[in-house]
Amino acid sequence: MTAAIANAKPGTTNYCAVAFFGFISLATLPALADGVEHHTPPFLPTGMAMFNTDSLLVWRDDGRLQIRDGKGVWSAVVQLPMQKIMQIRPDASGLLALGAPETPFGPSLIIALDPAGKESERWSVAGAWDITVSADARQAVTLSGVRPLLPQAAVGAEQAFPKWAGKRPENPQFPPKLLYWEAATIYCHPADLSMQHYAPARCERPGAEGWIYEYGESMQAPVACGPWLVVNEGKHQEQLTVLEMATGKIRSRRKFHSHPRIACAGEDQLAIAERSLEQAQLPALNSTWHASIGKDQIIELAALPRYLAYRTEKSLDVILMPSPRRSD
Amino acid sequence: MAELKPRATPAFKKPAIKRQELHFYPGARQLIWLVNDEVKVKAEAWGGESPIPGFTYSVMPPRQTTPGKYVIHSYAPYRTKTWIWSTIAWGTRISVSFDKGEEKVFYETGQLSQPWKPVEGITKAQIESNHLALYGTYKVPETWVFNDFGAMSVRYFKDLNNNKKLDKGETLSGEMIHTTPGDEARTARSMEVSLQSSHGCIHVKPNDRDRFYRAGAFTKGNDFIIHGYAEPVPEKYL
């Protein structure tokens, strides 16, 4: 079955195969052995994330999303008023979704949704590349800085990125991902592997107590988890490195067989998925919990308070595996 | 008796020898196509620059384009495994399909055994982001427009035995004449192109590359002379 999907002729997504695979999965529902939960979304997901404390969000980049609330109930499919989602970020009051510009270099639509998936606010921002959420602000990220997203559809003036430290012949051509730790902001640029603008991946904390950490050809976004920053490194992104966000000092490194997917599962716990699921203590990356899932490679991971949600390369299901409670 | 007038000997017509040369003056940033010492096409072209002292270069520090006498070898899309965006030739058809649990971008190989292969090391979202940077829309285009060397590259070699052929013991120069994906995108959007220094290659504008090509400057076997950085363009070619 999977081979049939993999060998399908490129051109369009093989929805027949997806639907058939979904039917097979539905036929096996509910697979709730040992509390493991399977869910087949009515679309092939592009991403998933924990939001609103204990809810799970699954979306497809064509604007469709589905929400599983804390009681385990999945919502109907919500269609966002955008043809293409570039980014989704959960925040304290729901989530923000950034749509792709509909005309070349035109403005992008950003909408805020409440925990039930209902639109609460919207903004139109020219040149938006990303959205970022901190404890007290929602911002659109442009190529040169951030613009606050204010009430009543207002967009604040751009606050330029700091001057990047280090001696490089040119500034990065893509904007950084912004990560927050206490009062500090960490700016992380993925590697630029173009010949003209080549630059390694790097995270930087600007300012007097600033630091720079460069980590090769990684195009993966780092994960902030409490006071720790976790980056994928190595030729195949097979190594995890934990940095202290305050100082940029390396606190631990650990190699895996392949590229591990990671998600923050609490201030000192990192969920790690490869061909098994694991929780590891930060910053040492010592394993505290482990669960086998079979032989399939996990390609996506999100950490909920009592579950790890994941997808594998050989199934369209979102699987929720009970994990140790964060307070345990 | 009529006097026989000697018939005038027809004037000897010299065969028109076409002397064709492509010249690059890196200091003056000029690429000039000469036919019988007459300028046929002239355009701005940028070579490599010396590394800036004190700056950090991660992989390939820039260098000056190497002066010398060369012979044009080919004019074709270029591929290399050295640069991840250049493993696929410009203009290759691409398409999105499902593979191993997620949507991936595939490219057409032209091989019967495996007509489509997944693009390795670059995700669909990264391709969409690059398209946003270049063309302003977040999408997977129909063809590959991300090759670092642009649509076509002109390759050349040092012809050690002067037979105009690439023989054993002769190698293609790693430097070549090409455009950049950014300049290709600006040209496609009818925007002005401002050239930038290369790492050693010779950068031209896409429209100028096409003009040189149409004029025959990039024909296999043509002589190509790269002058020194201090050498000015002779006044007669200005």
Image (cartoon, coloured by chain):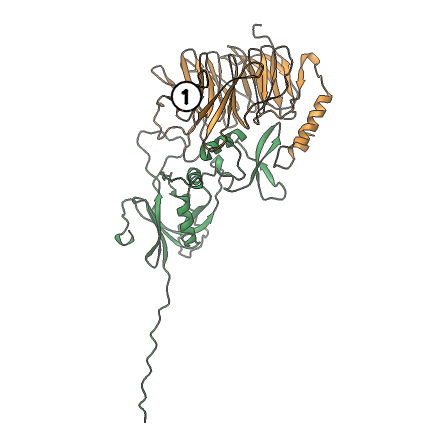
Q: Nearer the viewer, residue B16 or A156?
A: A156
Q: Does dot 1 land on a helix, a strand or a loop?
A: strand
Residue at x 39% of width, y 47% of height = B208
Quadrant holding the C terminus of chain A: top right
Q: Is residue B212 above or below residue A77?
A: below
The colour of chain B is green
Q: Which chain is orange?
A: A
Residue A180 seen from this side: yes
Residue that lies at the very extreme toward the left in this rendered image: B235
Q: Nearer the viewer, residue A80 or A264?
A: A80
Is B53 left, or right, of A215 in this rendering?
Answer: left
Q: How many marks?
A: 1
The residue tagged 1 is A146
Residue B214 location, x and y as percent? 43, 53
Residue at x 68% of width, y 31% of height = A16
Which amino acid, by three-letter code, is at mark 1? Val
Residue at x 30% of width, y 44% of height = B27
Tell me where residue B112 sits by quadrant: top right
Residue that lies at the very extreme toward the front in this rendered image: A152
Residue B123 seen from this side: no
Residue A308 location, x and y as percent? 60, 15
Residue B67 location, x and y as percent? 33, 46
Residue B187 location, x and y as percent? 42, 41
Q: Chain of mark 1?
A: A
Residue that lies at the very extreme toward the bottom in this rendered image: B1
Q: Is residue A57 above or below residue A192?
A: above
Quadrant holding the N terminus of chain A: top right
- Graded by Cα atoms within 10 Å as few (under 14), some (14 to 19) or many (20 or more), the crowding at tag 1 reads many
